[in-house]
Amino acid sequence: MASVAVVSFRLGVADGVSVAAEQWVTALRRMGCRVRTVAGAGAADRLVPGLAFDARSPARSRELMAALRGIDLVVVENVCSLPMNPPVTEALAQVLRGRRAILRHHDLPWERERYAHLRGWPPDDPSWRHVAISQYSAAELARRGIDATAVYHGYARLPRRGNRAAGRAALGLTPHQRLLLQPTRAIPRKNVAAGIALAQALGAVYWLTGAAEEGYGAALADLLARASCPVRRGLPGGLRMADAYAAADAVVLPSTWEGFGLPLIESALAVRPLAVSDYPVAREVARLGFAWFPVDDPAPLAAWLADPNPALLAGNRALAQRHFGPDALAKRLSDTLTHAGLPLRCAR
């Protein structure tokens, strides 16, 4: 039985990288692999503080080698993608050179203004395989001389339906209040202002579940204070994200940029209409046939909410199951592991 380590700056929290990494962890275990999670922060089988994106000094080689002892393949989740802490990346890259690894790129430097000037990212080695989470990112890597395979996110098991009544009760909503959910963190590119504007136009309560990061707290507080619609923040204790989706009447993903954007699929599986901005990967996923609403024009979503068409939601859910469900993920992972040279006995 093959052993796989999944390594990231942090795991076990609500950000997109952690959620997507957990999808792979679950799928790999169901395929028969032994999986060890390794992270600098959050929740993991092995916590190595020197791997955290805010670590003051990088992990030592012997710490990383100990954490990866007995591992056949290392899956690196974004540590070698964004230069959030270059010494940490360099420390991990040095330990992995000559060793089988999959570098899974959720974000890339040229996608962020503050990193766009940097060269030499991501690091490369003949023993490594690069995986992008979209065709768009794979093409951008190819333009820079990095051969990458596009592997979409997917679910090893489809999320259970949430509890609408519990979610709305936890927020103190009346039965007739409309709720617009933005299931993201609060950072500049998540475009909270556009999410609030859509809620205001719809006469809805605006609910932002994620925490403010990257020094965005003051700007977020100002935006929320000026909102003319009711606002809810965070995920109340005892609720799951499935309950948040169930409680909502619609979902908004107003980001100016996403490496992928899990709410594209989560909203479909939760059978909720989605308003989404026109970023490149959203356009790519939309070509599969999804029907979404614009963020900057509230009229189409307002009309749909006034006279819902269940066929739209049923169609989106069927597409999500077909392209991002357990069978699709298992096929993509099996192909990826084969190309990475992992012994086939890992798969059942």
Image: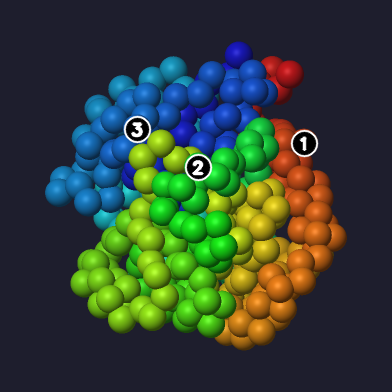
Tag 3's secondary structure?
Answer: loop
Dividing the picture into quadrants, the one containing residue 272 is: bottom right
Picture coordinates of residue 255 (x, y %)? Answer: 50, 72
Picture coordinates of residue 259 (x, y %)? Answer: 53, 62
Which residue, given by chain and number where applicable, does mark 3 sit on?
A: 43
- Up-down relation of residue 63 to residue 54 (above or below): above
Which corner quadrant holds the C terminus?
top right
Real-space CA distance between mark 1 and mark 3, rounded to the nearest whole angstrom: 27 Å
Which corner quadrant holds the N terminus?
top right
From the viewer's side, name the closer residue of 224 and 27: 224
At label 3, which amino acid type do we have? Ala
- Up-down relation of residue 224 to residue 168 (above or below): below
Residue 319: which disc? Answer: none
Which mark is nearer the camera, 3 or 2? 2
Which mark is nearer the camera, 2 or 1? 2
Query: Is residue 181 something that shows in the picture?
Result: yes
Q: Residue at 52% x, 76% y: name it.
A: 203
